[in-house]
Amino acid sequence: MAERDEFVRLFSSEIRSVFGGLPKDFESIQEIRLRAGKPVLVIYKGREFFMTRTGALTEEEARGYSIGREELLETIQHIGSYSLYAYEEELKQGFLTVKGGHRIGVAGRVVMEGNQIKSVKYISFLNVRLAHEQKGCADEVLPYVIREDGVCHTLIISPPRCGKTTLLRDLIRQISNGSGPLPGQTVGVVDERSEIAGSYRGVPQNDLGIRTDVLDCCPKALGMMMLLRSMAPQVIAVDELGDYEDIHAIEAVKNCGCRLLATVHGSSVEDIKAKPLLQKLVTEKFFQRYVLLWNHDRVGQIKGIFDERGTPLLPGESLC
């Protein structure tokens, strides 16, 4: 209840009165989307609902409460403590991270300076992604990603909203703290979009373990190289591989004897093999473990775990 109340206080007075009726199982809310002149949308237990004026959830669009532009303006000012200039660097990337680790995505008019984004003005769209830790959600996966020689290079494959970042976060925590036969490892996290650690003013709001160092709002490729030079990690963790620059940093990780935990969007292993960057890594058998998620019955359900040869270690499709 305290977490929900603290979250609600982020918003304008009018929106707070609406959110006062949020479901009691606050942990099941994944996203809240606010668009000027449009009804509030909520992703709850993996399904999309509209929110009424009293905070109830409905599938009827006509009953949804429409947000006014003034309410959005008051909300974004309130979130930024009426000093948005202090959050200019985050806004350039399209989001703000607030206390509790929640991420507020923003959209509106983009102001350019040369080829670089200078700021975002006339913000009319907010995507509130709630940070929910699920400690222990990696319990089933962890035994498959550790061996006698340490942590395996591991790639988590998942469609959107299937829990890949949540799983990665708990793997980091358990590997950092040590679990069973695995002694605690020094983990470096490159948190490009502030989703893994949910850092607020540089301090992670999510528990990533006692041996974890975080580079917040840093591009993955640059961050991996910085961590290798400065923090001597045994394991590096990143979310959503995809840029060509990443492959050079991955080579450096490999050559330094560091292990990599990473995620990527995909609905099957065939999707991954079709991506030029990842195809090379799959062909060279860089990743020693592949964890495939889906949400057939629930978010974060494991569809399969495979080794570098594509051999299923749990029931699932074959990589070959």
Image (cartoon, rainbow, N blue to C red):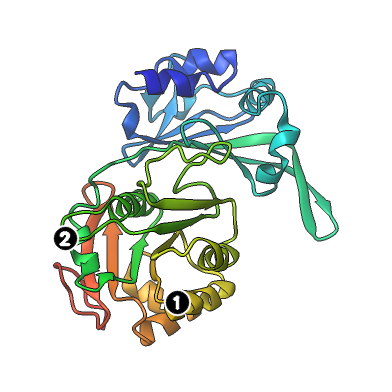
35 on left or right of 163:
right
What residue do we see at 48% from left, 79% from top? 251
Tell me where residue 5 appears, x and y as whole percent: 43, 17
Q: On screen, 244 above or below 21?
A: below
Residue that mark 2 sits on: 181
Residue at left offset 48%, top offset 36%: 102
Q: Residue at x 41, y 40 (%)?
A: 206
Position of the N terminus by quadrant:
top left
Query: What residue is shown with label 1?
Result: 256
Above or below, comparing residue 191 to residue 122 in the picture: below
Q: Would residue 200 be seen by someone viewing this image from the given angle?
A: yes
Q: Answer above or below: position of 115 versus 67.
A: below
Asked if residue 39 lies left or right of residue 268, the reply is: right
Q: Secondary structure at mark 1?
A: loop
Q: Which amino acid does the dot numbered 2 rest on? A: Pro
Q: Horizontal and vertical percent for residue 249?
A: 53, 74
What percent of the width, then of the height, locates residue 21?
Answer: 40, 16
Q: What secondary structure is found at the residue carrying circle 2?
A: loop
209 relative position to 86: left or right: left
